[in-house]
């Protein structure tokens, strides 16, 4: 199996895990029908008709409760900007592996595979840049990729506006002021993640990204048409059918904790594709590390914790047992 020179040494790393003998991946081979996520037209939020606005807000809250995932159109992020960002992203990932890995690009945030994996089912066939929004304006982060900076700054601003708008709806639907989220989540606390999933000939058996939930309030995903995203629905994995005109939104752990399990942070994964590479960009709405996450009502399902405490617990779990445990660590 040949990988292009710009790709990271994924096959080399995976081969070492395969030689270890623990290769139980049979559950990932089953084919499944691709399903459409709930589709919500966000023009309703701008309507002067209060009934239409309420219907749109109700649809957002319902999808967040029943699915934990939904897709949005007429979201306010221009298709031209999404196209420019995708082209810049592709150009970045086509750079030689050595440049991506050693030149300190984008706050030295490049990563690939999974260095803590002890078996194939903990390994992700992908590479990514995970960038704090505080760093995207710094020209020194971009090296030779000077045209990426302006596009990424505009992209981050648009995603931040959309994320805060959606979070505000979800907070208000539970009877609280949206300032509770807006004041704690800003450009100093949020992240962008640029993902690239190289083609993989053994894609029916290999994760592009291992099963997980997101550790933020909510995530906005712009994915290409290749597909591979799957989520847990009614105790089984379902494939998400790509919609080129829509952005995907999913609830994170912090919103599930804050809402007292009203909104669901759903496990999801990406399966690699045997013939096509896949690109996506995720925006993560996060609070500051010292922000206290408590329930919006009593009695609470979870004990209070700071975002920093939650992130530390995840890091310890991954280090010790190879995977994230998540909110169950904080149940009362």
Image (cartoon, rainbow, N blue to C red):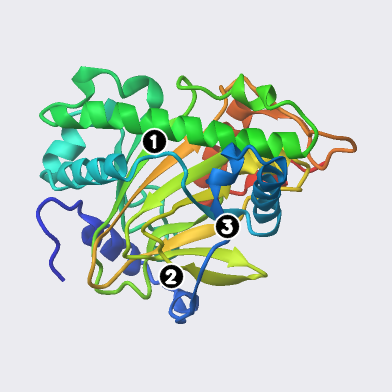
Residue 30 in picture, x, y percent from top left: 47, 81
> How many numbered marks appear?
3
| CA distance for labels 2 and 1 | 33 Å
Q: Name the side, left or right, on which 100 lies relative to 317.
A: left
Q: Name the side, left or right, on which 301 lies relative to 131.
A: right
Query: Mark 1–mark 3 contact, CB under 8 Å?
Result: no
| Picture disc at residue 247 | none
Q: Quick one: SS at disc 3?
A: loop
Q: Quick one: SS at disc 2?
A: loop
Q: Which residue is mark 3?
A: 267
Q: Categorize mark 1 by other alpha carbons within 10 Å: few (<14), some (14-19), many (20+).
A: many
**Which badge, 1 or 3, is on the more N-terminal residue?**
1
- Can you see residue 286? yes
| CA distance for labels 2 and 3 | 23 Å
Q: Categorize mark 3 by other alpha carbons within 10 Å: few (<14), some (14-19), many (20+).
A: some
| 81 vs 276: above or below | above
| CA distance for labels 1 and 3 | 20 Å
Q: Which residue is mark 1?
A: 192
Residue appearing at x 57%, y 55% in the figure: 69
| Picture disc at residue 22 | 2
Residue 282 in picture, x, y percent from top left: 41, 43
Q: Quick one: SS at disc 1?
A: strand
- Can you see residue 214? no
Mark 2 or 3, closer to the camera: 3
**Which badge, 2 or 3, is on the more N-terminal residue?**
2
């Amino acid at each position: 199996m040949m990988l292009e020179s710009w790709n990271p040494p994924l096959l080399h790393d995976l081969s070492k895990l395969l030689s270890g003998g623990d290769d139980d991946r049979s559950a990932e081979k089953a084919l499944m029908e691709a399903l459409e996520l709930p589709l919500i037209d966000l023009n309703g939020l701008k309507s002067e008709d209060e009934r239409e606005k309420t219907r749109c807000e109700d649809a957002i809250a319902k999808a967040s409760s029943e699915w934990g995932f939904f897709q949005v159109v007429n979201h306010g992020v221009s298709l031209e900007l999404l196209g420019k960002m995708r082209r810049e992203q592709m150009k970045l990932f086509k750079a030689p592996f050595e440049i991506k890995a050693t030149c300190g690009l984008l706050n030295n945030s490049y990563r690939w595979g999974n260095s803590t994996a002890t078996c194939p089912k903990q390994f992700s066939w992908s590479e990514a840049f995970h960038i704090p929004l505080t760093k995207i304006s710094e020209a020194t982060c971009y090296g030779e990729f000077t045209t990426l900076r302006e596009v990424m700054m505009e992209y981050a601003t648009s995603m931040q506006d959309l994320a805060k708008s959606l979070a505000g709806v979800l907070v208000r639907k539970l009877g609280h002021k949206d300032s509770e989220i807006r004041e704690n989540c800003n450009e100093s606390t949020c992240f962008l993640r640029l993902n690239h999933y190289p083609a993989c000939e053994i894609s029916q058996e290999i994760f592009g990204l291992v099963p997980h939930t997101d550790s933020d309030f909510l995530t906005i995903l712009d994915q290409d048409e290749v597909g591979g995203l799957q989520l847990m629905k009614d105790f089984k994995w379902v494939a998400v059918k790509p919609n080129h005109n829509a952005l995907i939104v999913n609830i994170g752990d912090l919103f599930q904790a804050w809402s007292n399990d009203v909104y669901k942070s759903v496990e999801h994964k990406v399966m690699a594709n045997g013939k096509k590479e896949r690109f996506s960009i995720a925006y993560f709405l996060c609070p500051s590390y010292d922000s206290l996450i408590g329930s919006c009502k009593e009695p609470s399902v979870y004990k209070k914790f700071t975002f920093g405490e939650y992130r530390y617990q995840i890091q310890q779990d991954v280090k010790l047992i190879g995977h994230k445990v998540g909110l169950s660590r904080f149940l009362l």
